[in-house]
Amino acid sequence: MGGLFFSTLLVLLFILFVYLGEQRMQDSLRSQAAVLTHSLESTLVRSVQDVHGRMRIQARRLAERESLASNPAEMSDQLINLVQAVPQLREMAVLNAQGQVLATSGSAPLMQDQSEEMNTCLEWFQAGQVIAVGRPLPGRSMSQPQSPGGLYHIPLCVPVTPGNLDTTLWVVAVLNPDALREQFYPVVHNLKAEAALYRYDGLPLVRLPESTRVESEDEASGYTALLEQRDWGVIEERRDGITWVTGYRSTSMYPLLLTVSIDQAAALSRWHETIRGISWAVALALLIIVVAVVIMSWLKVRQGKLLAELKLLSAAISTTANAVLITDTQGRIQWVNHAFTKMMDYKPDEVVGFTPALLNSGEHSKLFFQHLWRTILEGQVWRGEVVNLNRARQRLVVEQTITPILGDKGEVTHFVAVQEDITARKQAEEQSKFLSTHDPLTGLANRRALAHKLQQVLQELHSIEVALLYIDLDNFKAVNDTLGHGKGDQLLQIAVQRLKHSLPEAVFISRLGGDEFALVLGEKGAREQALVLAQRTCELLSESFELQGARFQLTASIGISMADSGTDPQTLLRQADLAMYRAKNAGRGTFRVFSSDMDIQAQHRVSLEQGLRKEVESGFASLEMRYQPIYDARTLRPVGAEVLMRWCGADGEWVSPAEFIPVAEDSGLIVDIGAWQLKQVMKQLADWSAVADDGFYLSLNISAVQLARDNVANRLLEMLEAYGLGRDRVVVEITETTLMGVTPRVEENLAVLEASGVRLSIDDFGTGYSSLGYLRELDASYLKIDRSFIIGIGNRDSDEEIVLAMLALAKSLGMKVVAEGVDSDEQLQFLRQNGCDLIQGFLLAKPMTVTEINQLILTK
Ligand code: C2E
Ligand code: CA
Ligand code: CA
């Protein structure tokens, strides 16, 4: 806008300047013309006056002495003298009234005829005039009338009347136009002007430069017309396509008119050149202004756009969710956005001017920051996690990206740091990382971490020994079931604390889940130490626990495996597991070291399971029932029989139920087998009831697995109903250990049986740790003393006492006692004497086939 105004002003000023300048130049040109005319006039007048003066001298001579007129020689001398040293005068002559030459300064012979000069003088001469100016005549002078190259002369005439003569004589002077020109020349030449001399009537006399124009008399008449108003002036005229500034002036004494014409264009050419120059300059200035204005407005538009972009950008940055801070190259904070102040709890003016060291948590090494600075000073982006402290000195983990901002020359001018608060994510990550490798309850390493640890130590097997201890708490399930899971968890935590405090630091402790733990020992001599460690662990865990005022005793079974070259973690674990089972089988609370035969047994178990599975699929073709009679201790008459399963394996060998029943339980096949068995038993009982109905019963072993997974109780009742059998025809044997891990399902089954009137028998009594309270509550009818106690009768006093205590206990609970595995008279006598109710054992009868037991029943 300013540019446009300025350029318009410039143009106007320039026009004004040109206009005024032109006016001034024109004025000065006019006055110049006037001055020139004036000065030329005075030169001319002086010249003519000089000539006129000489003519008057001659005229006076003629007037004073009449005789002179008749003395041409004297007159000629006088005239020659007068002509000398006057360049504007070529010749002087005296003529008579007839125009005949009486004397001349020239060399030409006197002519008798009237001279042409005379004619022209007379033509113009008027009375009262001091001088007459004749028409220009060809030739150098009167006496030299030849005119080479247009040579001419101008005659001037003055009349003389000598006193006593009544005739008129004429003194004639021949003016040299070239001399006049020479006088004009210096004035005219410099200005490239033209000058002209006219007779008063407009007759051209002298012209400078010569032959500049073909003269017409009308031209001059213009000036003579002007002279009527004023005898000098300046006019502007156009001639030959040129504008002339012409000054004109008449001489007051002589009938002469002088003009000086200045070529206006030529005279003003310098001025016009200057104007042109200035015009160019102005045009250039205008162009520059216009270009500048265009550039400026373009820049302005661009700047506007940039500003708008910048505004948008800064608005976006200030409202972005990520914290943004901008520092200078020294790291001093220049600007922070809203998210930063919110995240760090600092106001902008509390951090601006400070370095981010204000936020330093001290958790990073010097090297860390050195690397960071090196990266960004090299103009590269740095990305990483930084731990900062906010105003309240709270720890914040941020993911930070620092981008160097480069200047025009590629130099770093600022740094922009964008920070994202990942504290929560980090914590969650750490938590999940911890959880992925740790057990949440005890904080111990978990199964995965164990695998990792094993992997790691097994790689160093060339320099160390590796031992793995697999720990399983005995009967922990019972603890859980009786005390509740909360207590069970507490007990586990206490147990873990014990291990952590008492075991050497080098021992890696992990929890595999439930009540299973693993210890890893990876160092020189680990094989030997493993046994010590196992012993120590057994001791530690068997020490009593105190939980809410009550005391508990736990034991652990431990399997130990030692790594050989090429052992992988899975194998090591499996081997330790097998060894642990061995320890459990060996009576719990002890440890076993894995040996290769355990592996063979394990494989055997696997093939057994496959065989049993086939058995189930093929309709139990190779399973048979045996019946071992149970005798009344007093009468020694059979009152019932225990149903014992027999399996003829794939190779035709009889497989012991002690061997295959645990496999059937572990694989869950026992449920199908049990259901099948139940049917067989019902059929058998139905057969017998046709023969004799005197309360002969069958005692059925029902596994804990069946009680836990199957609604075996209802199934049994339904079948008794279906076969029309009384509920007193079956006794259900459940092991004491079953009672140690009672689940709701087991409880439900037992409750159904109890309520139905089907008798319960506690099998293998003395091998578990069943609570007496539960036993009383259960209302079982029989208690079967385990064979291991019966064997001791007659051999070990302690066992006899235990048997007596059991008999007393059973009595006090209102239960009958069955002694199983009685195979000597001594045992039989002892039991009979001490009030044992029922006897089962090889001494009286081995398990029998159906045919055999039929025989027995019929003959009893
Ligand atoms: P159990 O319930 O304790 O059965 C008694 C075991 O003692 C039987 O072994 C029986 O043959 C054996 N026995 C009885 N009297 C004597 C004796 O005087 N001397 C010796 N040395 N042994 C005697 P069996 O038949 O080998 O059964 C072993 C175990 O397998 C049983 O122990 C029982 O727990 C389980 N079992 C057998 N059949 C079944 C079944 O049909 N169902 C379930 N769930 N378990 C069964
Ligand atoms: Ca039994
Ligand atoms: Ca038993």
Image (tube, helix red, strand yellow):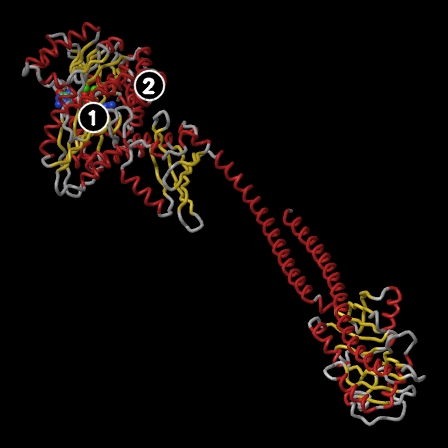
Q: Mark 2 and 1 residues: CB-CB less than 8 Å, in contact?
A: no
Q: Which mark is residue 510?
A: none
Q: Earlier in the sequence, mark 2 or mark 1?
A: 1
Helix, strand or loop status at disc 2: helix
Q: Residue 401 falls in which quadrant of the image?
A: top left
Image quadrant, ligand 1: top left
Q: Residue 755 falls in which quadrant of the image?
A: top left
Q: Quadrant of the C terminus?
A: top left
On screen, 53 above or below 794? below
On screen, 417 above or below 3? above
Disc 1: residue Cβ within 8 A of ligand 1's nearest atom: no
> Which amino acid, mark 2?
Arg
In the rendered structure, the answer to whether residue 516 lies left or right of residue 138 reads left
Q: Which mark is residue 745?
A: 2
- Residue matched to label 1: 472
The CA distance from mark 2 to mark 1 is 24 Å
Residue found at the far right of this picture: 166
Neighbourhood count class around disc 2 (C-alpha, 10 Å): few under 14, some 14–19, many 20 upward: some
